[in-house]
Image: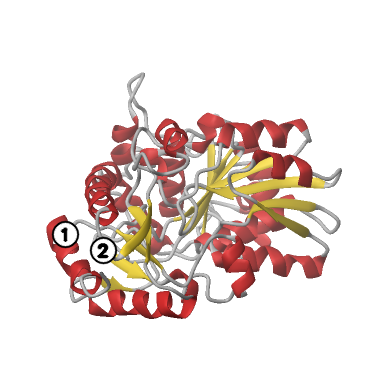
Amino acid sequence: MDAQNKKIPRVKFPPGVRRDTLAVREGLPASAWGENSEALFLTSSFVHPDSAKAAARFGNEEEAFVYSRFSNPTVMMMERRLAALEGTTGCIGTSSGMSAITLLVLGLLKGGDHVLCSRSVFGATIKLLQDFGKFGIETTFVSQTELDEWKAAVRPNTKLLFAETPSNPLTEICDIQALANLAHEVGALLAVDNCFCSPALQQPARFGADLVVHSGTKYLDGQGRVVAGAVCGDEALIDSKLMPVMRSAGLSLSPFNAWVVLKGMETLSVRMEAQTARAHKLAQWLESQPGVSRVYYPGLPSHPQHALAMNQQSGLGGAVLSFEVIGQTPEARREHAFHVIDSTRLLSITSNLGDTKTIITHPASTSHGRLTEEQRLSAGITQGMIRVAVGLEDVEDVKEDLWTGLSRLS
């Protein structure tokens, strides 16, 4: 504890330290024991030297660790590291990516407020925002890519714009800067889900986003081990709007899960570079397969927002792609998609992503299965769509695994 400033100390860096260094070094200074790998603080509460100190700390007059529902050293290390990678001054860890969105809504909005959201976001996000309608928070869903739709849907009570880019599973790209400008013109905030790219490829705050949402379950961890989430943004906004809700509601990130994500971020850059390179090769191969009618991958020139993606995503397409299989009817395309998925022997059939193991799933019946068929089709999610989150296997093995099923469709 810095007694003079009553602040928890920070790691001291030379001027101009770069992002990859922060991914390995940012956090908290080592304890008195001098550990090189960050410590895991498994404690529910923290001891205070006297009653006056306890009162000051509980009253936010002095920054200190009080209770792990809302303050823990391991969680803070993860928060500081992720904020450094996103280029924001603040971050708050949550128990999952969906709890991060819940915290966002509870902290920023009230009954009578209006949300504008892309209709292409994760299915659970759509359901969650719809559920908040029972509390008087209405959401209008618009095209991910048509800025005019966003403008036309703005209301006097619009307080939040929400998008994920690339979207799940179509990999549609929104213009972050344009949406930020629109939000700020009408006195609203822009929140961007950066799950697919992670800060290794994209930092939405650079383009004007006020808040960045993460499912740490995905690339931040990187090995499919834990469930975690976070919201990054201006420290003052997080402390004034989100932290009070965290203290009361307990959407807390556990210290162990925070530690796993913290260590995962150390290899984030090299993993994303390697997985992106494999995904690009796989997407190019899929475009040439007769059993495939369309490939969705921002790194391909055929992607409708390719140029925008290259500008926002450090010139890289990311590690997730989707493709549609051929078929005369929706039923036939669903049957073909199931056949391709079930014919794999190497890929993991699960709806997660961001793992070192390549994952394959059928979005219409899994991640977006709770939506109506009308909602799915309005978001471009067909019964013939397959999503692949490319891992670190040899890409030739991934191709051969997919070819087993695809070869029977041509």
From the image, which quarter does the C terminus lie in?
bottom left
- Front-lying residue, 285 or 265: 285
Neighbour class for label 2 at 10 Å: few (<14), some, many (≥20)? many
- Front-lying residue, 130 or 30: 130
> Can you say whether 3 is above or below 360 in the image?
above
Apparent side of residue 251 relative to residue 244 in the rendered image (left or right): left
Q: Residue at x 36, y 28 (%)?
A: 12
Residue on which the image places disc 1: 393
Residues marked 2 and 1 touching at CB (< 8 Å)? yes
Using the image, tell me which numbered label, if any, was put on residue 358.
Answer: 2
Apparent side of residue 54 relative to residue 256 in the rendered image (left or right): right
- Front-lying residue, 367 or 41: 367
Using the image, tell me which numbered label, if any, was put on residue 96.
Answer: none
In the image, residue 15 lies at what x, y percent? Answer: 36, 18
- Front-lying residue, 37 or 323: 323
Quadrant position of residue 169: bottom left
Q: Can residue 59 be seen in this view?
A: no
Q: Which residue is drawn at 35% across and 51% down?
A: 262
